[in-house]
Amino acid sequence: MSLPFVVDEQDLEQQERTLAPSGEARLNGLVPLAWHLRQRDGKRAIGLAREARELMRQFELGETRARAVALRLALVEAEVSWGLADYEHAQRLVDDAILAAQASGDTAAAADARWIAASLASDLGDTVRRDESLQACEALAHRLGDVQRTLIARAAIARWAVFSDPMLARERWGDAFGDGSGPWPVGVATWVTDFLGNLAFSDGDNGPAILHRLRVHEDAVASGQWQRAVVALTNIGACFSNLNDHDSSLIWMQRGLDEARRLGWPMAVAGALIQLGGILQPLGRLDAAIELLQEARGMLVIAPKSRSLVIALHYLGEGLNLQGKHAEALEVLAELEMRANTLKQSDMLMEVRLARATAMAGLGRRAEALALAHDALASCREFKRRVVEIRVLMELARLYTTTPPGEPPADAEDHAAALACLREAVAISQSIEGYQISGDLYDALAQEHAHAGDHAVAYEVSRQAAKAREATVGTAALNRSIAMQIGFQTERTRADAELQRSLATTLQQTTATLEVLGAIGQEITRHLDEQAVFDILQAHVHDLLDATHFSVWALNAAGDTIELAFGIDEGQPMVPGRQIPMDREVSNVARCARTRQEILRQEAPEGYNPNHIPGTFRAASALYAPLVVGDSLLGVMSIQSPKAHVYGERERLIFRTLCAYGAIGLHNSRAYKLLGETLGELQLAQDELARKNALLEQAYLQQQEASFTDPLTQLRNRRFLMAHIEDEIALTLRRSERQQRQSPIEPTLDHDLVFYMLDIDFFKSVNDQYGHAAGDAVLVEMARRLHSVIRETDFLIRWGGEEFLLVARATHAGEGAVLAERLRGVVAEQQFDIGDGKSLAVTCSVGFASFPFHASEPRLANWSEVTRLADQALYVAKEGGRNRWAGVEATRAPRDRAHFEQICRDPRAAEAQGDVTLLRSQAE
């Protein structure tokens, strides 16, 4: 019985729609539906498989078909059991399936059984069986001529190869999948881009790695491969952490953990806990990190040989070392080394030996620590891990010069050995293209030169340390900029579904832009001369943006005048020194400086323009942005073009990034003039630069807040709801449970949340007949009218397309129909103006349900399930003729979760059984 390995949501919906209500036709539809729901909804998949087995007993299928159906249903049960970590049962089913598929000649089932066997082996840490199973899967799929299965297996083999040896993986598979853009059969992009993302991550290219993993998540969700989707979320978080954007990292990690808990997959939950614990450690939240890692370690007793357990032990050992619990760390690291050896995880062997050396040193066992560090160094050289080798050499230098209490201090030979290690570390750093040498490495080298009496060399190295820290600040600013750009791209892509078809092209263009911006940032932050900063900015502004005019204006010391510091107008330099009073009303430069806000002007090329500077060209588009560092305004940067409407959102983001770099560069140059020649004065400059980095973080948070708003309707979007709904749910649950504890004679408070799903009736016909501009006008007016009948405290969300979600806060569940009628009426009562003197009658349909779903069991249902019920009620209203509302109201408490899920799937059947009441409006 040959079925596609995975299908997209459209095909799945078609299967759902065409599922017959009874008979052998239903059996024929149940089998593929159960197979394609195996990761999307494991419980339902098992339920459908059981129903299919019951139907098999009612019909004469023939021996061959009966075996094929039974085999496919066994594979569904095996994969669901794997997800639930019921490994013994899953392994038994897979072994039986392999034998049955061989006996019956069912090649597709044989390939799928090998795939599930590889997944089991991966969780259980049996890398040999994993690789053998994947290779067998690929061979079977290739023999079958199944391109989808063949490519997925091949990409999975390449993905796992990266963990063993990235260099060999690149040599073997680097060109096998091109740039990953395809086109591919459904589901293949999940594994191809996962492989490419792992390669980029192993190279330290976090920007491209994020873009690949966003594609992994998008394609995995669309094709029902939810295990990969969850892993992609946590991997995206890890990349953002490497870019120093810890806020975004925690958001993505938490999303991964929430999805894993929703799915109920222990290994996915453990993996998310591990990644979240690893992120919390560098943020200094060691207690919380270790608690999460210990929880994950406890869960992974089901898979003692898995790579997930290896990673958990690695993070746990590092955390215990940071807490000074070196004896406990050694116990964890001993277990880690044993498991890493068993799994042949070369990357972990170096890390564990380095961590053990740190623990040994912390316990005063210096000789053992030195021996372990030398072992780690040998491993680094064997596997050519140069970045790790630098860290090992720095640790060796520290061990040579640090002796335990009570022992003699390090002698001249020890210091000479330390100096040799540090020199080698610097040489390796300089040999790695693009590697940023840390100030700590230069400081340690300067200290050893000073100890050897080479004070002139020590002073020169100290100056290099200061420059390295300046470059580090620039790198941090660059990483923050990259994170902001990627965060913006991510939110914009998720908010606008129509752009998804062109996502791959957009992300490629963004990557190229980010690479250019990164190079500019590094170039600017390397210079401490003001004129050099101006020259770099103007050169790159003309490369990236349409700018016939470019100028930088500096605020004077008194703060009452802004002066032209640098300018290029139609290729000719502008004479600096022109001054504009800060209170001049008609000057955009002065207004931008006063308000500290970006100004975009769209001027007509002809006619009077009071802002025009005599002797310069007349601009049709002009953009002004303040140059701010901390609370200090440095000036204003401006670009202008004779073309109209050339500065869209992308161009404005690029310009903001250039302004951020320009502000840092100008501030650096001014700060450098104030520095003396002593190391103490250099330290003051480093502190100032560190504060500037906090500014970029603040700017990023402001950008993140902007991403909570739908650009067309100015309503809040899904991201806003996801960020705030859990707090509302917690408050509602506390109020509900407090209400249950109070006396029956006390008044009942309005503490429910009512979720309304609203859909504009026949909206597609508006776009088809009158154009998208008319459709946009309807959406904007719809938002205005809905706002007019709700409270300021309610959440009104642009849910997507013509759908809106309203969360009525602190209300009473029994009054849901009142607001539903008010919402319906305000839309239908007056025609919509769609422009060009035309108006149109527009109606909407409304469905609603309340949270808690039943007062006696407030925690039985979560908010997303109540939203699903509201959506079901919306369909009831649509079926009733539109311009109506319908609501789902619990008649009695559900018996258990399974009963509630049955209600969610079919509230009409639940109404017939007396479990719920479907409230309906009268026909209008």
Image (tube, rainbow, N blue to C red):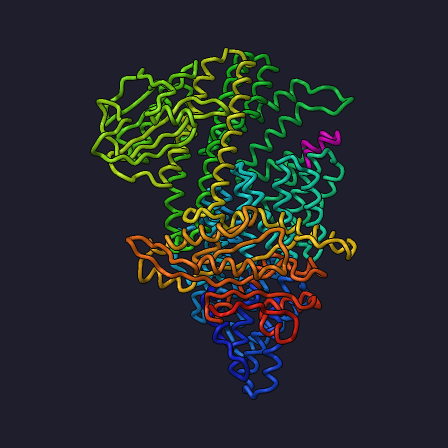
Residue 402 visible = yes
Query: 33 or 772: which is nearer to us?
Result: 772
* Chain part drawn in magenta: 356-370
Count of numbered circles on the image: 0
**4 vs 690: above or below:** below
User: Residue at coordinates 61% horizontally, 85% vertically from top-left?
Assistant: 57
Query: 861 or 210: which is nearer to us?
Result: 861
Q: Position of residue 121 (x, y in %)?
A: 61, 60
Is residue 396 rendered to the left or right of residue 198? right
Residue that extends furthest to the front in the rendered view of this protein: 829
Q: Quadrant of residue 177?
A: bottom left
Q: Position of residue 715 (x, y in %)?
A: 47, 48
User: Residue at coordinates 48% horizontally, 26% vertically from top-left?
Assistant: 471
Residue 76 visible = no
Q: Is residue 367 magenta?
A: yes
Is residue 339 rendered to the left or right of residue 132? right
Residue that extends furthest to the bottom in the rendered view of this protein: 60
Q: Position of residue 485 (x, y in %)?
A: 44, 40
User: Residue at coordinates 67% horizontally, 64% vertically from top-left?
Assistant: 86
**86 vs 733: above or below:** below
Q: Position of residue 239 (x, y in %)?
A: 52, 43
Q: Main secondary structure of the magenta part?
A: helix
User: Residue at coordinates 70% horizontally, 66% vertically from top-left?
Assistant: 893
Q: Is residue 137 magenta?
A: no
Query: 308 or 537: which is nearer to us?
Result: 537
